[in-house]
């Protein structure tokens, strides 16, 4: 499956940088130097952390501050020891993309050229990952990205069977992993139904899904109805809803940013579109988004990248998935969220790469990353046996949101196709439409 190459974007002015020097400085403090561990023997390792802290993708970064505090504690006590035995302090420099791809490219450029980081970690959608990865590849700085289907990162940046990337690496599941999970949910929630509606925006994710879903749907006996791409920020979905209603699409698949799905779903209810099953990527992976729907979110389904029930533990802290999620909920007063595990796993991968590298040079780090195999909080990640060079696959399951109280939801794992080692916690149910 080949996608259009990602846009290469120009830099724009940047402001707002958080620097965390480990150890010695508290989260959010500023520092121009390294950490203060007395037994460090090498230069401070600088790691850039790029995330959409504000804007339409902000739900992806809700747990970032907690994770960075956890990493501060860990690296202040342990530092990073390279394969040559030298121990280094760690400094993390966080940048907010404001959910803007142009700014993402610019903050990556600043991390490389001004802050002179040794590595960049980046997360959340092609609009964040791809411009940052492109900047790193061009400047020969190792970058590790996650939280976007690997095809949107690899093919979306112009990768092919013959064109690979040397300095940029990615881990997440792919569309070939998640679509069978979706089909399992559709078949169980709406058995015998074959009309499948689609909602794909005109962004990197939308292009990838629009390219992959039709052939897959046909192979499973579905007739796909795609009313056409729409821009992010759309406020009127009347034409799409009319098409879905006219076609009697009892199953719905889509990928949308959170604000857009909230708008769509409320308008769909008002206009009488009531599918039996709706699996929506990106938008409803967060409890805060589903809660914004009031009682209209019961049994909405999506993929589950990570949850407290996943049988994996951190290679850094030893915390199980359940313990890590509980610690977050206690510290934040908020419900756990899927990106929590992946934000932590980014630092597990970074630590493993540095620890197995004989130096902090990009050449040595890239060589180490190309064959890295590490067990993390989100599962085993193996770059030596990925679908493409520079790609490692993480597990994915399927879940449904269940109303547990007054507009409060929890997600249950209802499909573990491809990953029987991850237990299901409930059966698939059709959408529970409230009586009018």
Image (cartoon, rainbow, N blue to C red):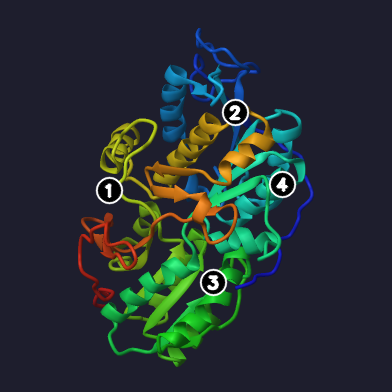
Q: Is residue 108 left or right of residue 300?
A: right
Depth order, front residue of 3/391: 391
Q: Nearer the viewer, mark 2 or mark 1?
A: 2
Circle nearer the viewer, 4 or 2: 2
- Disc 2: which residue: 358
Q: Which residue occupies 21% across, 55% down?
A: 405
Position of residue 154 measured from the top left corner of the image (x, y, whole percent)? 62, 59
Disc 1 crowd rating (10 Å Cα; few below 14, some 14-19, many 20+) is some
Instruction: Give me the C-alpha separation between circle 3 and circle 4.
Output: 25 Å
Whether label 3 touches label 1, CB < 8 Å: no
Q: Are marks 3 and 4 in contact (CB under 8 Å)?
A: no
Residue identified by numbered label 3 = 209
Count neighbours of disc 2 (C-alpha within 10 A) and say few if under 14, some if 14 to 19, many if 20 or more. Answer: some
Residue 227 vertical position relative to residue 431 in the rendered view, above or below: below
Question: Gap between marks 4 and 1, in whole Å?
Answer: 34 Å
Of pointers 4 and 2, the one earlier in the residue sequence: 4
Q: Residues within 10 Å of mark 4 (few under 14, many from 20)?
A: some
């Amino acid at each position: 499956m080949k996608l259009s190459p990602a846009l290469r974007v120009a830099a724009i002015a940047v402001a707002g940088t958080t620097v965390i020097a480990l150890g010695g400085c508290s989260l959010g403090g500023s520092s121009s130097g390294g950490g203060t561990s007395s037994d460090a023997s090498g230069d401070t390792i600088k790691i850039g952390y790029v995330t959409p802290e504000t804007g339409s993708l902000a739900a992806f970064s809700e747990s970032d501050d907690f994770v960075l505090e956890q990493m501060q504690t860990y690296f202040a006590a342990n530092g990073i020891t390279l394969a040559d035995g030298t121990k280094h302090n760690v400094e993390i420099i966080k940048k907010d993309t404001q959910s803007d791809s142009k700014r993402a490219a610019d903050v990556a450029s600043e991390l490389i050229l001004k802050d002179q980081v040794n590595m960049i970690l980046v997360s959340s959608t092609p609009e964040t990952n791809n411009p940052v990865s492109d900047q790193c590849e061009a400047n020969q700085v190792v970058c590790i990205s996650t939280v976007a289907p690997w095809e949107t990162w690899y093919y979306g940046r112009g990768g092919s069977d013959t064109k690979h990337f040397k300095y940029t690496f990615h881990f997440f599941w792919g569309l070939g992993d998640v679509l069978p999970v979706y089909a399992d949910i559709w078949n169980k929630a709406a058995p015998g139904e074959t009309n499948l509606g689609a909602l794909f925006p005109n962004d990197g994710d939308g292009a990838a899904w629009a390219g992959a879903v039709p052939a897959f749907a046909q192979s499973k006996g579905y007739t796909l109805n795609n009313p056409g791409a729409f821009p992010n920020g759309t406020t009127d979905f009347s034409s799409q809803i009319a098409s879905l209603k006219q076609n009697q699409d009892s199953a719905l698949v889509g990928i949308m940013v959170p604000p857009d799905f909230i708008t769509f779903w409320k308008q769909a209810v008002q206009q009488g579109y009531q599918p039996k099953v709706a699996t929506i990527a990106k938008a409803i992976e967060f409890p805060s988004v589903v809660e914004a729907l009031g009682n209209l979110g019961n049994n909405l389904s999506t993929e589950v990248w990570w949850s407290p029930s996943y049988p994996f533990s951190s290679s850094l802290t030893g915390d199980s998935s359940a313990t890590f999620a509980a610690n977050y909920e206690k510290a934040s007063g908020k419900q756990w969220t899927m990106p929590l595990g992946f934000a932590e796993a980014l630092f597990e991968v970074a630590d493993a790469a540095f620890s197995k590298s004989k130096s902090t040079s990009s050449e040595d780090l890239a060589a180490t990353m190309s064959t890295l195999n590490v067990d993390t909080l989100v599962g085993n990640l193996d770059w030596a046996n990925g679908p493409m060079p520079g790609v490692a696959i993480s597990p994915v399951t399927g879940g449904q949101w269940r109303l547990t109280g007054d507009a409060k939801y929890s997600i249950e794992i209802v499909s573990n196709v491809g990953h029987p080692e991850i237990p299901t916690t409930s059966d698939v149910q059709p959408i529970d439409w409230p009586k009018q």
